[in-house]
Image: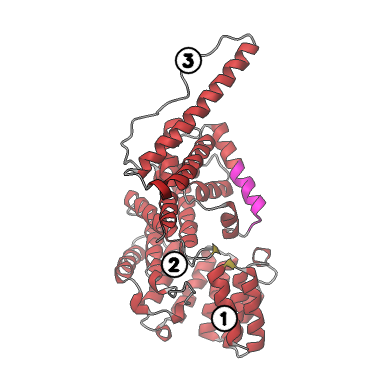
């Protein structure tokens, strides 16, 4: 791996930990985020040339803290000038709030940061957007793409969330018992989106962004350790493990995408499959069934099939029907259409896809066209399939996926 790529991955992993440490210490979320960004930029410039320091997290916290100290001194000086101009006595001499408490250098505040971003004082949509930005490190464009909304809309949500934190003084702390359930729901959704972006990058030259998937799994483990009896927490962790088990089989040496039915299943990670299967097996009989458990059960059925033709599609279809009742959204319907096609034939799947044509959330999304192309090819309509593959290729922002879709179209000439 090139040094700059290694540095980039390390910085992405450390960023939420550093932000958490600063917010705990100084309490000013927006200013802390700016200071962390400056520290990350300094590291991105210095580390590839000078080498990664022995304690990179501590280095970043130190540099970001200096930026915060400079900012607080500047703010303090400006306030004193304003007070003097107004004829008021200057305030006390200290600069900024200082450390809220002593923390060992290896302490990780990411989980606290995660729950803070999901505070009920923030609107639900802003909670999730801010979490993905601060903890997941996703760009505004990536978050907008995940939720099928315009980028300016998502930028406004994130900006308003930061303003709300500043206005309400949301504390940097884990939630009280009476808030856990509501905040946990947003936390799990955020981890789900972070993992998905890591497992299948929505843009750029790589199939996946490994560091995002790893961090999402790590945080899911932390939440599971905190709440071991919660069925949806276990279900989400199981879903991540079962999905991530296919990582080594998903791309060729040249980076091109390999779809599920063409993957070498001997490359699937057996330990992740075992752990994920055990988690979901224990959870389904113990807790109320939720959408993450249902998705994990679908992933487990795929993992149990030694060959594509061994896949239990009728059971998968039944689970997608259940999932759609729990969380009706166009992406679930899209996946159900594939299962319908595998059980009842491609024309039945195409009929279901037609119900999504007027859904504005999918109007420009490449996956609708890609799935339609696949089902048209299954139905023998290769001319129409080729056109849909090309249409999907034009819409995607992922280079590997674009190449895959173009290769599919080229096969049908």
Residue 173 occupies quadrant? top left
Q: Position of residue 84 (x, y in %)?
A: 61, 11
Which residue has dot 1 on it? 407
Camera-side residue of 327 and 194: 194
Q: Is residue 324 magenta?
A: no
Q: Which mark is residue 93?
A: 3
Looking at the image, which residue is at 54% across and 37% down?
30
Q: Position of residue 157 (x, y in %)?
A: 61, 46
Please indicate, yes or no, whether residue 175 appears anywhere in the rendered image.
no
Which residue has dot 2 on it? 294
Say which label, 1 or 3, has the lower sequence index: 3
Say which label, 3 or 2, has the lower sequence index: 3
Looking at the image, which residue is at 55% across and 12% down?
90
How packed mark 3 is, by other alpha carbons closer than 10 Å (few <14, some 14-19, many 20 or more), is few
Q: Which residues are magenta?
A: 149-159
Q: Which mark is residue 169?
A: none
Q: Is residue 155 magenta?
A: yes
């Amino acid at each position: 791996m090139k040094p700059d790529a290694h540095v980039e991955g390390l910085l992405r992993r450390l960023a939420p930990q550093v932000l958490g440490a600063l917010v705990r210490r100084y309490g000013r979320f927006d200013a802390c985020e700016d200071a962390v960004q400056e520290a990350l930029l300094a590291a991105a410039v210095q580390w590839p040339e000078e080498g990664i320091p022995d304690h990179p997290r501590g280095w970043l916290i130190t540099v970001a803290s200096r930026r915060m100290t400079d900012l607080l001194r500047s703010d303090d000086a400006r306030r004193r000038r304003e007070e003097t101009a107004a004829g008021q006595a200057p305030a006390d001499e200290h600069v900024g709030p200082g450390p809220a408490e002593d923390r060992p250098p290896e302490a990780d505040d990411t989980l606290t940061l995660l729950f803070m971003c999901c505070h009920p004082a923030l609107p639900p949509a802003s909670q999730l957007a801010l979490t993905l930005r601060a903890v997941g490190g996703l760009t505004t464009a990536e978050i907008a793409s995940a939720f099928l909304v315009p980028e300016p809309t998502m930028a406004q949500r994130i900006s308003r969330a930061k303003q709300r934190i500043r206005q309400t003084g949301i504390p940097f702390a884990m939630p009280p018992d009476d808030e856990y359930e509501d905040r946990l729901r947003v936390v799990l959704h955020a981890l789900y989106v972070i993992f998905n972006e890591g497992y299948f990058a929505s843009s750029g030259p790589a199939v996946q962004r490994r560091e995002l998937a790893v961090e999402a799994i790590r945080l899911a483990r932390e939440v599971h350790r905190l709440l071991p009896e919660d069925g949806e927490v276990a279900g989400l962790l199981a879903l991540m493990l079962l999905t991530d088990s296919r990582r080594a089989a998903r791309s060729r040496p040249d980076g091109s995408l390999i779809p599920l039915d063409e993957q070498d299943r001997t490359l699937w990670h057996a330990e992740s499959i075992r752990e994920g299967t055990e988690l979901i097996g224990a959870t389904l009989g113990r807790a109320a069934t939720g959408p993450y458990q249902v998705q994990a059960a679908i992933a487990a059925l795929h993992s149990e099939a030694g060959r594509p033709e061994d896949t239990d599609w009728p059971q998968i279809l039944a689970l997608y029907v259940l999932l759609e009742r729990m969380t009706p959204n166009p992406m679930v319907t899209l996946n159900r259409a594939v299962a319908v096609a595998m059980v009842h034939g491609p024309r039945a799947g195409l009929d279901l896809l037609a119900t999504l044509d007027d859904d504005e959330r999918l109007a420009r999304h490449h996956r609708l066209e890609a799935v339609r192309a696949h089902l048209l090819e299954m139905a023998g309509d290769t001319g129409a399939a080729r056109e849909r593959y090309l249409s999907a290729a034009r819409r995607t922002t992922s280079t590997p996926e674009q190449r895959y879709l173009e290769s599919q179209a080229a096969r049908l000439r």
